[in-house]
Amino acid sequence: MTPDEADPAPAPDRAPAPDRGEEPPDLGDAHVGLLVALGAVAITWWVAERPGWALVIAAALAVWFVVALAFVTAFGGRGRNAVRRAYAATFGWLTYF
């Protein structure tokens, strides 16, 4: 490629465009939310006589993540950025407390 030729368009995963609102989400609260959710599953597993309720909670979180990922992907999210946004949507609820 010569210097006069334009660079090809970057892949959507490679560099988000902050001017289009594609800044990756901050995941600090999402990590804490994941720890709280895992703690709730662990406590439920320990307190309940049967581990069924802990599995119900874990399955609900997994379904929520899959739905969030499908939603983000349907509206143009791709690759790592889509997974980050779905993760933030699933576990980033700690921001609102």
Image (cartoon, helix red, strand yellow):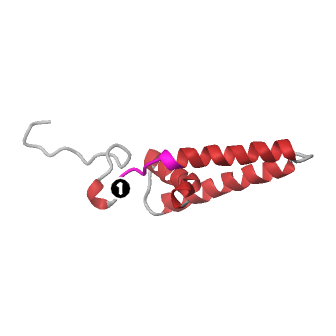
Identify the residue at image location x=33%, y=46%: 11
Asked whether 35 or 90 is in front, the reply is 35
Quadrant, the N terminus? top left
Identify the residue at image location x=55%, y=44%: 31
Q: What residue does disc 1 label?
A: 22
Q: Position of residue 35 (x, y in %)?
A: 63, 43
Give the SS element for disc 1: loop
Which residue is farthest left?
4
Identify the residue at image location x=26%, y=58%: 19
Which residue is farthest right?
49
**Within 10 Å of the Cα at label 1, are there few (<14), some (14-19), or many (20+) other Cα atoms?**
few
Q: Position of residue 51 (x, y in %)?
A: 86, 45
| Residue 69 seen from this side | no
| Residue 71 seen from this side | yes
Asked whether 83 or 36 is in front, the reply is 36
Quadrant, the C terminus? bottom right
Q: Position of residue 90 (x, y in %)?
A: 58, 55
Asked whether 14 or 62 is in front, the reply is 62
Main secondary structure of the magenta stretch: loop
For the magenta stretch, what is the residue range?
22-29
Q: Position of residue 57 (x, y in %)?
A: 75, 53
Q: Is residue 28 above or below residue 95?
A: above
Identify the residue at image location x=73%, y=49%: 58
Give the amino acid at mark 1.
Glu
